[in-house]
Amino acid sequence: MLAKAPNQDFSNPTLQIRAPASSGWYSISQTPEYIAFGKHGDDPDESFAAAVFLFRLPALADGDAFTEYVREGVIKDSPSDRFDTIEQSVQYSSERNYHCVRYHRISIDKKARAGFFRKKLRLENIALYCQHPGKPGLGFSVSYSHRGGSPDYNIEEEEAAAFIDSVQVASSSKTPELLCLTLVMPMLTACVSGAPDLDDEQERRLPKLAVYPAGQLPIEPYRELGTVTAADCSGAPLGGRVYGNVDRAMDTLKRKAVAMSADAIIDASCGAEPLLNTDDPLQPRSKHVTPHGPPSTDLR
């Protein structure tokens, strides 16, 4: 668990995100859809958490429908066999210029883990759920919670509000342009053409190119540019035709993607293709695809 500096920047093209402003926070988890910070309290079983989620949304008619969607989600995530509800509020909020819902809950976690044991601990959670105004089908939540400690303790509203208010929609988010690419490391009968020459700007973009392996997709909406392949046979003894080097092939693939102005690679895979006999297997083609929403992520 790495300590985080107050207000440390974790922004991305979708959201502006900063660590909580006070000291003592550390990183719990970070994925493309989720980032969470934790902090120990004064008591051994006392802790604080601050988190940001991205999640997929169905088509919702209006703010009332979004409010009901959030209400159903938080009820689902708080089953009665584990939590005894003391107080709960789910209300539409007009604090931002897009649909948001305020959530506040105080409950008893009957199966909280405290060291090697489980015990009943008081849990308070304050959260804001919002629909992303520039990305249809995408929602995000910002939460601040406290567990354990004194049963009379209430979250300091100013600190919770400061963290929630610090998470904002990125001002210049654009729909990424991605390539649906296949990496081929074939048993070759002839080596293929190398990577294209990149200009200075493309070389600067190369390290930032994201690669999503087969079966994974970015959380953000995207537009496919086309499909290309890359191959390599430099790993073969004496320049033969038996096998290739996957790292070299991947580098070629990424350079071809950058040259085509892609922001990321999706559906990248590696496999053998015997008797590939061509001087240039790269066959880029334009593929106009209507941008769509992110993959399904449960509301948390």
Image (spheres, rainbow, N blue to C red):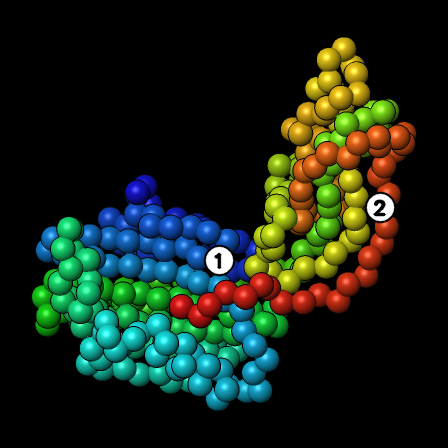
Image quadrant where residue 199 sits: top right
Q: Nearer the viewer, residue 59 or 128?
A: 59
Measure how far apart labels 2 and 1 are at the Cα level: 31 Å
Image quadrant where residue 250 sits: top right
Q: Name the residue tied to disc 2.
A: 284
Quarter of the picture holding the C terminus: bottom left
Question: Residue drawn at (61%, 72%), measured in percent from left and top?
Answer: 136
The x and y percentages for residue 64 are: 48, 89
Quarter of the picture holding the N terminus: top left
Instruction: Name the element at disc 1.
Output: loop
Task: Characterize the local packing of mark 2: few (<14), some (14-19) or many (20 or more) Cα atoms within 10 angstroms.
Answer: some
The x and y percentages for residue 23 are: 26, 50
For marks 2 and 1 on the same chain, the one whose residue lies earlier in the sequence: 1
The residue sitting at the front extreme is: 274
Q: Name the residue tied to disc 1.
A: 33
Camera sees residue 203 = no
Question: Against 161, is 234 above or below?
Answer: above
Task: Characterize the local packing of mark 1: few (<14), some (14-19) or many (20 or more) Cα atoms within 10 angstroms.
Answer: some
Instruction: Name the element at disc 2.
Output: loop
Q: Nearer the viewer, residue 26 or 21?
A: 26
Q: Amino acid at mark 1?
A: Glu
Question: Against 109, is 187 above or below?
Answer: above
Question: Residue drawn at (43%, 73%), measured in percent from left and top?
Answer: 129
